[in-house]
Image (cartoon, rainbow, N blue to C red):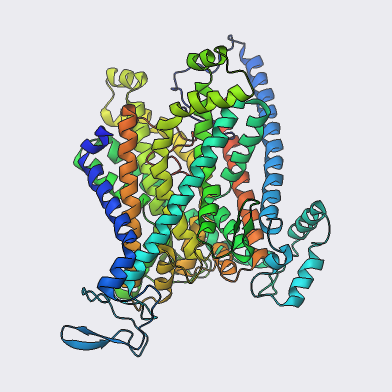
Amino acid sequence: MRAVLRNRVALAFGVLFVAIVLLCLLAPIYAKDVAHTGPNANHITDTVMVGGKRVDVVSPTGVPIGPTWKGRFLLGADSNGRDVAVRLLYGGRNSLEIAAIATAITMVLAVTLGMLAGYMRGLADGVLSRLFDLVWAYPAVLLGVALGVALAVGGIDLGLFTLHSGSLLLPAFVIGVVVFPYVAKPLRAHTLSLREREFVDAARIMGYPPPLGSLRIMASEILPNLSSTIVVFAPLIVANAVLLEAALSYLGAGVQAPNSSWGTMIADGTRLMPGAIHLVLVPGIMLVLTVLSVNVFADAVRDALDPKATGRQSIPGSGHAVGSPIGRRGRL
Amino acid sequence: MEASSVPGIPSVTGSPTQPVSGAPPRSPISSAMARHAWMARFLARRLASLVAVLFAITLLTFLIFQAIPGGDPALRMAGRLATPQQVQDVRVQWGFDKPIYVQYLKTMEKVLDGSVISYSQQTNVEQEIVRDLPPTVSLALGAGIVWLVVGVLFGLLSAVHAGGLLDRALTVVSLTGISMPVFFLGAIMLYWLGYQWHLLPLEGYVPITSDPWGWFTHMLMPWVSLSVVSIGVYSRLLRANLLDVMSEDYVRTARAKGLSERRVLIRHVLRNSLTGIVTLWGLDFAWVIGGGAILVESVFNLGGVGQYAAQSIGRLDIPPVMVVTMLVAAAVVLLSTLVDIAYALLDPRVRLS
């Protein structure tokens, strides 16, 4: 961690990311005390003072006002006369929330299944590895879209709990399922090599008899040794989850109205082109800054944990491309 | 971190100086025969696994759309805008009252004989897909060439000037490219290059047969926006690979025997790294059709298969989405098998377990 902190560029981008997260969390305060409006409040017929003149929020021809750089409509309005800055923060909250939950789902699935496959070998490994390969064979966007659309109509009943259509958890669930093999495969490979090490043999001999003992060995001997791999992957999964959520929402298979996210905001803005480019630029720049800051930070984490990594990280086809272990396929 | 070997993708880790195999030396004839026998076994195994994966992919796609717990599959299939009569039609047509394996067979029968009907448009899905193929193929091929050439160029420059100013600049460009959603980049280019400066045509697709120059100018922005992410990934991948190879013994030998730096770089270093890059390219190519193409085609209104899928998503019209998903996933698997076989034919070092 100290090595990451010593890397000034990485530190700056890390701070930027934290700042973005904090800003989005403060969305309700900004809406109430600065912009004096809500994310879904329409002001189509309102006017606003700009440079001493009264200006329509949405012109009679339907073109919304651009950035005023004042408290109200700081970053302009959209075609419904809603405050873009307020929507940006609320949308960002949704985007980041989905990315965080998706990353958690990915990690839980990947660690459990990857470790199980690697440690148990044999039949369990065969079945699980085929499952990883199958999900892996699908283009991430396509599988996400397919799942997203299928679930958007009726939701899903997972037995323990039900995700209704329109829920924010739905895109998070879809992304988690689509992305997990990219982490599960390397974790499985890592576990395969760990289980042959002496300390695992020692644990086995010291009386952790199978089958319950296997679980204990996995939890107390293997898992701690996987932590560096997990730490390297986590930020990269966050970056890719943000991108995948934006793509799904852009296509209409992610966040559903009336909820918004950066992806749906860009989609709305694109539809109004060339009328109001700020509707595309504002959420787009925010999205790029977020993903970039996570990517740079992730790079630094990887370099810090594996000093060798700078020169030699990857073998084509090994599953982890440079810069992004899922770069090869998680690309949008 | 251990290199996870991906089934179907031969991993090449050794240097070219490595012996072909651990087997004792044989006469040329028997080794050629052994090679043929190995090749035949390899082909048979790859084809068998191809069939298995294709089956699994259609099954998974079927399950996603028709067997997800919660909700009526007929309702799901007919989409959000369906009338009660349509839902009833779907129920009868796809046999939702029958056991699940009958439903699967029925679905596959419809997909294979090309009789899937879109529920919001009442059109034949497979005919639409065939009609929409030319823009998608143009997009994927052109973008593939752009990102391979530019990615290799950037990677090479980065590696040669490793640690220098150019390397850092290219790293920034690559990282930004990797962090850029294609639909955002596409929208920005469309706005400035198209609407503001009138440099390039706005949108739509012009067939290459009717107007090659128009085809080229219309495809330019889509190609660039689709390839930027991949350029970032490829240049960083190649940079790391080149730096890795440069520390190999045989490169030192090549330098020691007095070859010029340029010759060492191109004949010995780049050549070794390129095999991996080209393999990756073959795989990614199919991948891009299913990923970025959906988004780019929608931004530039190219009217390709991806846009057809995207529009069907907007209408929550399931049959076209299902067929496109099956076809693209199948294409990915087919292409990766072809790449695999070509790779095994070209590279004598590849021995699959």
Task: Identify the residue at the far left of this view.
Answer: A52
Task: Identify the residue at the far bottom of this view.
Answer: A60
Position of residue A317 in the picture relative to residue B188 (left or right): right
Decide which of B152, A323 is in the foreground and name it: A323
Instruction: Give percent across and percent down for residue A154.
Output: 64, 64
Instruction: Give percent across and percent down for residue B89.
Output: 78, 71
* Quarter the C terminus of chain B occupies: top right
Q: Quadrant of residue A61?
A: bottom left
Instruction: Give percent across and percent down for residue A191.
Output: 52, 26
* Quarter the N terminus of chain B occupies: top left
Decide which of B35, A321 is in the foreground and name it: A321
The residue that appears at 74% across and 74% down in the rendered structure is: B86
**Vertical side of B171 occupied by B64: above or below:** below
The residue that appears at 33% across and 72% down in the rendered structure is: A84
**Vertical side of B181 occupied by A47: above or below:** below
Task: Identify the residue at the far top of this view.
Answer: B24
Instruction: Give percent across and percent down for residue A12.
Output: 22, 47
The residue that appears at 42% across and 64% down in the rendered structure is: A261
